[in-house]
Amino acid sequence: MKRVVLILIIAFLAFISVKAQNKEKPADFSSVEILPQFPGGQSNFTKYIYSSLKYPTDARKIKGKVIVSFIVEKDGSLSNIRVLKGLGGTYDKEAVRIIKESPIWQPAIQGDKAVRFAYTAPINFQ
């Protein structure tokens, strides 16, 4: 019985190790030459957020901020979208929806190559 459990643990750890090696670790702002950019720049990103924002109608009107993080991939697509700090329920879902529907970004550049980049953004509900 102990051998079976040990074999399962080893197999699980090997699976996690192989899966982790398949994805490059995203870069941070201090290690890239050019940061990723929403089409048209930061001001267009802000306009996009506020034009896309649908205030949750099934919730009481709360003012606050949802902090989302995501990865800007080498091809400019967004992945690993998650809420770091939320307001709860429909507010968090709305913030994730806006980022998921975002157009393709310009990826971060390091040494003339596109690299993955971890990005964090606030979504304000006012």
Image: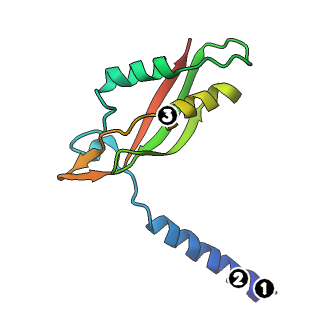
Q: x%, y% of residue 12?
A: 64, 74
Q: Is residue 115 visible?
A: yes
* Viewer-nearest residue: 16 or 74: 74
Q: x%, y% of residue 98?
A: 52, 30
Q: Is residue 108 left or right of residue 63?
A: left
Q: Considering the numbered disc 2 on the image, is that residue within a helix, a strand or a loop?
A: helix
Amino acid type, callout 3? Ile
* Quarter of image, res 48: top left
Q: Viewer-nearest of labels 2 and 3?
A: 3
| Label number found at residue 2 | 1
Q: Viewer-nearest of labels 1 and 3?
A: 3
In primary-sequence order, the first of circles 2 and 3 is: 2
Q: Considering the numbered disc 3 on the image, is that residue within a helix, a strand or a loop?
A: helix
What residue do we see at 56% from left, 11% from top?
126
Q: Spatial distance from mark 2 to mark 3, Cα to Cα?
A: 42 Å
Q: Spatial distance from mark 1 to mark 2, Cα to Cα?
A: 6 Å
Mark 1 burial class by Cα count in 10 Å: few <14, some 14-19, many 20+: few
- Colour pattern: rainbow
Q: Is residue 90 above or below residue 58?
A: below
Q: Which residue is mark 3?
A: 99
Q: Is residue 10 above or below residue 26?
A: below
* Viewer-nearest residue: 75 or 19: 75
* Viewer-nearest residue: 111 or 49: 49
What residue do we see at 75% from left, 81% from top?
5
Q: Which residue is mark 2?
A: 6
In primary-sequence order, the first of circles 1 and 3 is: 1
Q: Is residue 53 left or right of residue 33?
A: right
Mark 3 burial class by Cα count in 10 Å: few <14, some 14-19, many 20+: many
Mark 2 burial class by Cα count in 10 Å: few <14, some 14-19, many 20+: few
* Viewer-nearest residue: 68 or 74: 74
* Quarter of image, res 90: top right
